[in-house]
Amino acid sequence: MAELLGVAVLGAGHMGADHIRRLDQVVSGARVAAVADPDLDRAKEAVADLDGVTVHADPLAALAAPGVDAVLIASPGPAHEEPLLACFERGLPVLCEKPMVPDSTGALRVVEAEARLGHRLAQIGFMRRYDAEYGRLKSLLDGGGLGRPLMLHCTHRNVSSPPGFTSAMLINSSVSHEIDAARWLLGQELTAVTVLRPRPSAGAPEGLLDPQLVLFETDRGALVDVEVFVNCGFGYQVRCEAVCEQGSARIGEDHTMLVTAAGGAREEVAQDYLVRFADAYDREVQAWVDATRQGRITGPSAWDGYASSVVAEAGVRALESGVRTAVALAPRPDLYADVSR
């Protein structure tokens, strides 16, 4: 492997372009070797200031480009399965943004393909595991000082939803982060989901069921509730409170700049996930680069990506039916025996 890890970035949209910037300007030990996007002009613009980067419309061509040692997938979720399987065939370590594969059948194919290799190659981009506040909460719960966790109360708010955003996407796109965070924080699997729907906000586009209250049950008797509100209008907020037998702990209280001027004061509220979780993304990609250069794969696994897809699908069925819906996971391959526990 070259002194710097050569990374092929698949996808040059909002997320992909930010990862290209991150690899070039923030992360040490890596460089962008290739980029792929169906919109070649967008791909070229994303690497306009970088030298030695090849640009491709076909993601598989980027995998085969000179100097590529690893792959970062930041394309839309439905486009993930093919390059993931291609990375496995080529022995390329890969960091794949969530959702790993949106449908659980495809996600299981990825899990089974990696399990046949007998070793991990994929890390899935659930970046909240790299957020400092989430990390402290995880350490606190693992330490047992507050006793057994009973409930997690979660909030997930966005300023507005993009065009084409559907009611189902509140769960399989937005709440997918809470699904993984809950599994990781508690070390438990989610076994059932119920979705309650208040009267939609006046700020929601016509036909969008926004907000929603999503309630998860776990295999060890804990409850997780998520308020998801993707057209709140004022900011991007992510909060989580763990209620345990002997105390509680809350993160995400927007400890940002307080500006006082003209006889008043205002506290800044992040407007975008790339702002709120900028440090988490930096730590996630740096950890991936460091581990990859050492021949290791760490972080959220393909099994975590699969579990998230299964739970999200159950959530969408619960949304559509209005009834509690059970979650049914396939048997966990031995390769992932210790993941998320």
Image (cartoon, rainbow, N blue to C red):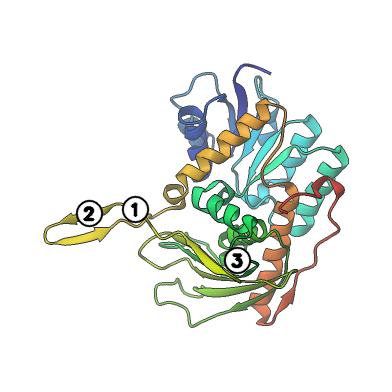
Secondary-structure class at tag 3: helix
Label 2 sits on residue = 259
Question: Quick one: which residue is furthest to the left in this view?
Answer: 262
Q: Residue 155 placed where, x, y %? A: 50, 66
Q: Quadrant of the C terminus?
A: bottom right
Label 1 sits on residue = 256
Q: What residue type is labelled 1?
A: Thr
Disc 3 vs disc 1: which is toward the camera?
1
Disc 2 vs disc 3: which is toward the camera?
2
Q: Residue 89 placed where, x, y %? A: 81, 34
Q: How crowded is mark 2: few (under 14 residues within 10 Å), some or many (20 or more)?
A: few
In the picture, measured across the screen, residue 199 lies left or right of residue 112, that is left
Which residue lies at the image location 73% right of the left edge and 31% below the top edge?
A: 92
The answer to whether residue 153 is seen in the rendering is: no
Q: Residue 93 placed where, x, y %? A: 71, 33
Whole-number angstrom distance, CA of label 3 to CA of label 1: 28 Å
Using the image, tell me which numbered label, if any, was put on residue 120.
none
**Disc 2 to disc 3: CB gap under 8 Å:** no
Secondary-structure class at tag 1: loop
Q: How crowded is mark 3: few (under 14 residues within 10 Å), some or many (20 or more)?
A: many
Which residue lies at the image location 46% right of the left edge and 44% below the top edge?
A: 278
Label 3 sits on residue = 171
Q: Which amino acid does label 2 sit on?
A: Val
Residue 225 figure quarter: bottom right
Q: Residue 142 placed where, x, y %? A: 64, 55
Q: Is residue 207 above or below residue 256?
A: below
Whole-number angstrom distance, CA of label 1 to CA of label 2: 10 Å
Q: Nearer the viewer, residue 224 or 36?
A: 224
Q: In this view, does 147 lie above or below 131?
A: below
The answer to whether residue 249 is seen in the rendering is: yes
> Mark 3 or mark 1: which comes first in sequence?
3
Number of residue marks? 3
